[in-house]
Image: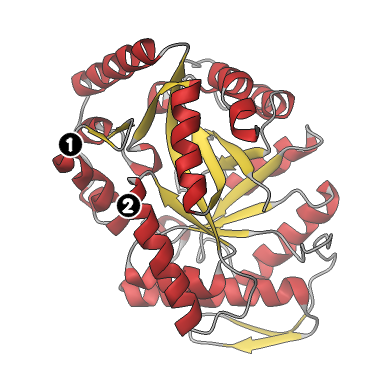
Amino acid sequence: MSLQFLWYIPNQAKPGHRGDDTVIGHNSLETLSNHAEALEEHGWGGALIGTGWGRPDTFTVATALAARTTTFQPLIAVRPGYWRPANFASAAATLDHLTGGRVLINIVSGKDNLAAYGDTEGDQAHRYGRTKEFMRIVRRLWTEEDVTHHGEHFGVTGSTVVPRPVVRGGRRHPRLYFGGASEAAERVAATEADVQLFWGEPLDGVAARIARLKQFSEHLGREHPPLEFGLRITTLVRDTTEQAWADAEAKVAEMAKGAVSRDPNWRAAVGQRRLLDLAARGEVLDDNLYTTPGKYGGGGAGTTWLVGSAEDVAKSLRNYQALGITHFVLSDTPYLPEIKRQGNQLLPLLRD
């Protein structure tokens, strides 16, 4: 199975995301296009573009960057509720058609300011039930005609999406990536997702989750090709191991100076709690998984860092690959220079 190497493009309303050093025009078309073009030039397949109320609209940003590039694949994060399934399926199929099949989709079910865009949501069972239904309808709209579905959360009648997504080889439509560490989330991933994205847990934790997801897929009667697995993690790469750790510790020291209290919802996610609790096991796990950033604001998908020379980090990523990880979403700041550094130093080792 081929490997996929993606980066992260920060479509943020405010500059300085995770210590990025671009301030003026940080979210301009020129700046973000420079990232996407650099990704193409330095061997990356594309980039995750995150979503959330209070930042530039993700789908609009992805469309603009796709128009400026030729091979760049936007991994577009979307939320059920922000989109209705038929509207989304049509928009994504159109962009996929226009780009020759470059669209990737990341379905997000985490907390957001739902009231700001007129959405409401119930408990965890309701949230993931809605997500599962959204994914099922979207997949049907991409692959069937005259779709009728009247469910608990969404409904469509006699719906056909035109144009259709690009069909190429085994690809029938854009891949659906999905995250979430709770049992409810894993049940959705096991039956409906194409790729389950993990955050940066130690190898034993990832191995256990892969085994559990495979069991769920079998017991719940998965109807799609086998679930694939991906890793979203920060990779801090320097010329030497010593320099990498010195820079990592310096970054954390700066984070500690500016640490602020967090939204109580921030720690509510099961996956986030798992990553933060790793610090209790030790500051460094496995060979070079740095857990300390989570103490000082390095939350979300970048909570843990792989630190070291290109050889050190490549070795660690290959260990994840040996468990079955085939999709990698990496990043470090400042984003643009690190696209180039890691594209030149890290990717060749991984592809070898």
Where residue 82 sits in the image (x, y, percent)?
52, 61
Query: Which kind of residue does numbered mark 2 sit on?
Result: Asp
Give the class, few, some or many, for how many residues have Cα within 10 Å of label 1's Cα (few <14, many ≥20). few
Q: For the C terminus, give its image quadrant.
A: top right
Where residue 60 sits in the image (x, y, percent)?
66, 44
Query: Which kind of residue does numbered mark 1 sit on?
Result: Gly
Describe residue 69's horizontal placement relative to residue 269 as left or right. right
Q: In this rendering, is residue 278 above or below 119?
A: above
Q: Earlier in the sequence, mark 1 or mark 2?
A: 2
Q: Secondary structure at mark 2?
A: helix
Describe residue 298's horizontal placement relative to residue 137 as left or right. left
Determine the image quadrant of residue 56.
Answer: top right
Q: Examine the rendering and report whether any part of residue 199 can be seen.
A: yes
Q: Going 32% across and 65% down the picture, which residue do you hit?
A: 182
Residue tagged by mark 1? 282
Task: State if disc 2 and disc 1 touch (CB < 8 Å).
Answer: no
| Disc number for residue 204 | 2
Describe residue 17's horizontal placement relative to residue 291 as left or right. right
**314 or 49: which is nearer to us?**
314
Q: Secondary structure at mark 1?
A: loop
**In this figure, what is the number of numbered marks?**
2
Give the class, few, some or many, for how many residues have Cα within 10 Å of label 2's Cα (few <14, many ≥20). few
Colour pattern of the rendering:
secondary structure
Q: Examine the rendering and report whether any part of residue 115 can be seen.
A: no
Where residue 296 sits in the image (x, y, percent)?
22, 30
Q: Which residue is most to the left?
A: 280
Q: Going 14% across and 42% down the picture, which residue do you hit?
A: 280
Where residue 188 sits in the image (x, y, percent)?
46, 72
Q: In this rendering, is residue 351 above or below 176?
A: above
